[in-house]
Image: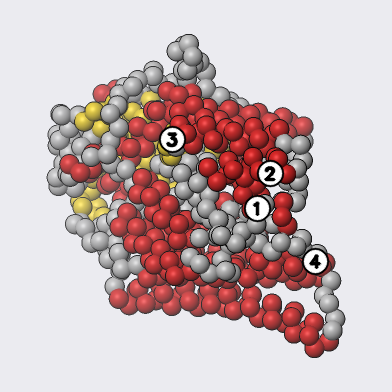
Amino acid sequence: MTSPRRRPLPHKPMTTYHQQQLKQRQCLPLLLCCLLIGCTLSNERWRTMNTVVLVEASFVSNPSHHFHTTTTPPTKSFNYRSTSSPSHTSNNSNNIHPNPLSNRRNQLTIVGSTPSTTSSDGVDSSSTSSQSVEVEFPPALSTIDTLKRAGKFWASVLPIIGSYYTMSAEIQFREILTGETITAEEEEIRWNEQHRKGADKIADTITSLKGFYIKTAQIIASRQDLFPKEYTEALSDFTDNVDPIPAELARAVVEKELLHVDEKFEDVFSSFDPIPLGAASVAQVHKATLTAKYGGPKEVAIKIQRPSIESKLMGDIANLKTLAKPLRDAEYMPLDYYTVFCELEKQLGDEFDFVAEASAMTRIYDTMTRDRVTGMTIESPLVIPRPVEGLVSKRVLVMDYLEGVPLSRAREEMLKKGIDPDGAEAKLFGRKLLKALTYTFGRCILETGFFHADPHPGNIFVLDDGRVGLIDFGQVKQISGRARQTLAKVMVALADRVSDTNPPDLKRIGDLAIELGVEFKPEAQVEAPPAVAMWLFDGTVDSLPGGYD
């Protein structure tokens, strides 16, 4: 297990607000630059693909934007649809078996139609009309478009970076020239306003440029420990609310990936909601209904990968690694971001293989629904969707449909229903949610070492029946038995310590942190290892040993 090394911070405790925030302000412009500049350098653009022809079909427009819980009998194996390249299945888990009867269409054809109308009881009442519609896959960006994209990025980001250095210089010169020291309260107000302006501009830029910028926004939004709250809050919408691809293009991907040569779209799905349930940087999800041929009528969720997105995102992350590598030993960087981006590259590579995701989903479901000691079937505290046998490929995944809202929109939903988000009912559910997540991730990490590695608020669902669901198993991790044992020892040592300054406790916690694989610079203080362990695993600590913050 390797971890990015955390830079040693000043030994003496900070005494003013300016000193406490200095490290963050120094690294923030550089970190934003490192995270975002590489996105404009990618030469991997959307590849041109052949035009596809849409032929007549029934097109059901369903206004629902929720997931519906379905019950699928547990199964250890399922079939998936083969794709054109055998290499797509080279890393599949043993519990996934190729379907020898699968014969995907080589010529991409999508079944389309005119919009339908739906009666008040939800039954489709439209008649099918015959018309052909042409849909094109996204073309490659021209040189002019690439330059425009880069120009827009620089026009937005450079002023943000410069404004941080300008404000820092203004504060320092004011102290030097006038001898006046700005109060902590005044400085906090000024920096918070600076963060708010910068965050709004970054959000607007990412909304316009999309691509790997979306993934960057998700990283920033999930790291409250590295970025000001103004940035994490402004970019939180990108966890589950990304601009989707057109419905016709989504249906084209489904047909290319899943349909047999003699099948039509309506042979598999009796309805398909053109409005996605959610959209992210790699894929989007649509609600549909299976036909009797595939076990229907049954409502399912279809996860559809954006065309050509893999080469684009992987090219962007390669550029970020190139930018971060020279900064590995820079004192003003709080982390070794080259290591971070290398890890992110591995995670992104896993996200593009939906066959592997289906395998991970099944594996974690089996862990949570089986007692490890007795082997008996038990109820999982989290609802985990199941893949639909025969409807899984590298780029399309059909699974159970969970009805609810993501945790990122739970507060908004509570207000709509007249529930006080800060009231007793909400707090009771919060404890239930925390217990379910702690139990699930505790079992997965400590028992099998295989766990969901991307539990951001967009992937945690509050279901209509009061239960909690977990979706998107594209990022998973496996840690060794020794690492699990060491991690458990760290938790016990932190819980049993006499105080945050007791030398024997700090020695034991520090040794375990080093055993986990955390690396430190030679000049780091002896308190550095226990300080990192507390920083990572104990959110109750107000002051870290050795003056670290």
The alpha-carbon separation of the residues under discs 4 and 1 comes to 25 Å
The alpha-carbon separation of the residues under discs 3 and 1 comes to 27 Å
Q: Residues within 10 Å of mark 3 (few under 14, many from 20)?
A: some
Foreground mark, 3 or 1? Answer: 1
Task: Please name the residue that numbered disc 4 is placed on.
Answer: 16
Kindly tell me whether residue 112 is visible in this rendering: no
In the picture, measured across the screen, residue 362 lies left or right of residue 19, that is left
Residue lying at 84% horizontally and 71% vertically, measured from the top left: 183
Task: Please name the residue that numbered disc 2 is placed on.
Answer: 506
Counting residues from the start of the chain, the first of labels 3 and 2 encountered is 3
Foreground mark, 4 or 1? Answer: 1
Determine which of the numbered discs, if any, sits on residue 159 in the image.
none
Counting residues from the start of the chain, the first of labels 4 and 1 encountered is 4
In the picture, measured across the screen, residue 288 lies left or right of residue 456, that is left
Residue 11 in the image: x percent, y percent? 71, 61
From what the image shows, is residue 179 above or below residue 488?
below
Residue 203: quarter of image: bottom right
Determine which of the numbered discs, if any, sits on residue 526 in the image.
1
Q: In which quadrant will I find the C terminus? A: bottom right
Q: Secondary structure at mark 3?
A: loop
In the picture, measured across the screen, residue 175 lies left or right of residue 287, that is right
Foreground mark, 2 or 4? Answer: 2
- Say if mark 3 contacts mark 2, CB within 8 Å: no
Q: Secondary structure at mark 2?
A: helix
The alpha-carbon separation of the residues under discs 3 and 4 comes to 43 Å
The alpha-carbon separation of the residues under discs 3 and 2 comes to 25 Å
Residue lying at 69% horizontally and 81% vertically, measured from the top left: 169
